[in-house]
Image (cartoon, grey):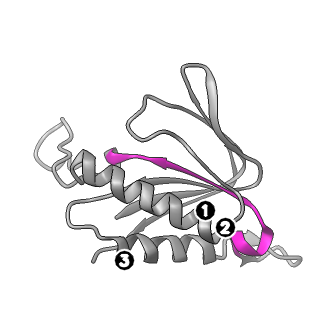
Amino acid sequence: MKAVIQRVASARVDIAGQTVGAIEAGLFVLLCAERGDVDALADRMLAKILKLRIFSDEAGKMNRSLQDIGGGLLVVSQFTLAADVSGGNRPSFTQAAAPDEGRRLYDYFVAQARAAHPVVATGEFGADMQVHLVNDGPVTIPLQMTA
């Protein structure tokens, strides 16, 4: 499972000109399920994201987590994080989970996030989305976990 995590001042996702998910300060997460990923891996990924200390404390050090600041979490599915460009110029996505399994794992991740954190918004799995965000810092962290 792969994720790209961005600390944001605000973020929103639009589909066909309509906002479907939005947060104020918090984390914007692009999430990719890969072949062989399981629920336990999604649980580990979520725990890491919620506890990642990338928000500043009073001294200006990255010492607070999303849970510490009570920020929002905006999760968007992004199978292109599984891209392999080693064989040419056209990306291969064979490492991405099959669409049905990718959707199941994404839905599982979001359900677990909503159970663990009070402010969770999402995009729409498989939709053509426009993402608008104000990256705070900027702080952008790639995460990869394997079973």
Q: Earlier in the sequence, mark 2 or mark 3?
A: 3
Mark-to-mark CA distance, 2 and 1? 5 Å
Image quarter in which the N terminus is found: bottom left
| Left or right: where 97 falls relative to 72 | left
Q: Mark 2 and 1 residues: CB-CB less than 8 Å, in contact?
A: yes
**Residue placed most toward the observer, 38 or 23:** 38
In the rendered image, the residue lying farthest to the left is 87
Graded by Cα atoms within 10 Å as few (under 14), some (14 to 19) or many (20 or more), the crowding at tag 3 reads few
Residue at point 36% right, 59% down? 105
Name the residue tied to disc 3: 40
Name the residue tied to disc 1: 114
| Left or right: where 72 falls relative to 141 | right
Magenta residues? 65-79
Q: Is residue 140 above or below residue 65?
A: above
Tell me where residue 124 appears, x and y as whole percent: 48, 39
Name the residue tied to disc 2: 117
The amino acid on which the numbered mark 2 sits, given as a three-letter code, is His
Helix or strand or loop: what does disc 1 sit on? helix
